[in-house]
Image (tube, grey):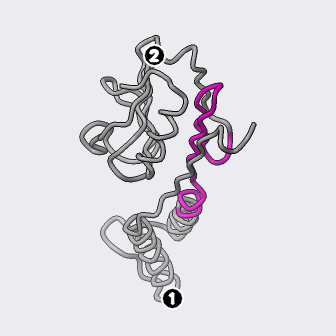
Amino acid sequence: MRKEDMYIEEQKFNQKWIYILLITILILFITGLIYQKITGHLIGNQPMSNNQYLFCIIFFIFLIIAIKKLKIKLTIDKSGIIISLFSLKFIKYKWDNIEKVFIRNYDTIGEFGGWGVRYSFSNGLAFIISGNKGLQIVLKTNKKVLISTQLPEKLQSFLDTLQINTE
């Protein structure tokens, strides 16, 4: 298949505030562990053990790495729509199963409660990295899937070339 016959968009978490928050928490756990090790004094009324500090440090390091590696990829071609997560084929929707697709504005917090892979009873499944525009997929079963896009005009232009049912 030629590259012109496909739409591919990869999105990564680029929100600096997420990393600042996680690194700040990590530094607090590291500082707490070092303080307890050096002074021998426990911190607080219900102190954490050194092993608990170590677990939290490892957890936050893993979380930071996982978020850094998180990538959502949207691929659209004549056969359908593929949504990949962490470079793994996650979901494929064939055009035969899709009622309609369209670009829409969404409220990340109000509709889905945040970023990432989310589910809402009223709005369906969502893959949200950032922004407030996404590709809404409505299946013939009436299930809904939304994936954020950073290139709504380019995506709409590609959908127009496919001549599919868009709203």
- Across and down, in percent, residue 6 comes to 64, 39
CA gap between label 2 and label 1 equals 64 Å
Q: Nearer the viewer, mark 2 or mark 1?
A: 2
Up-down: is 49 above or below 118?
below
Which quadrant does the C terminus fall into?
A: top left
Q: Is residue 155 magenta?
A: no
Q: Nearer the viewer, residue 134 or 33?
A: 134
Q: Residue furthest top?
A: 141
Residue bearing the label numbered 2: 99
x 43%, y 44%: residue: 148
- Across and down, in percent, residue 146 comes to 42, 34
Q: Amino acid at mark 1?
A: Ile
Label 2 Cα neighbours within 10 Å, binned few <14 / some 14-19 / many ≥20? some
Q: Nearer the viewer, residue 109 or 97?
A: 97
Span shown in magenta: 64-88
Q: Amino acid at mark 2?
A: Glu
x 52%, y 82%: residue: 37
Q: What kind of element bears circle 2?
A: strand
Q: Nearer the viewer, residue 109 or 144?
A: 144
Q: Residue furthest right?
A: 1
Up-down: is 54 above or below 1?
below
Residue 145 quadrant: top left
Residue bearing the label numbered 1: 38
Residue 99 quadrant: top left
x 50%, y 83%: residue: 34
Up-down: is 51 above or below 7?
below
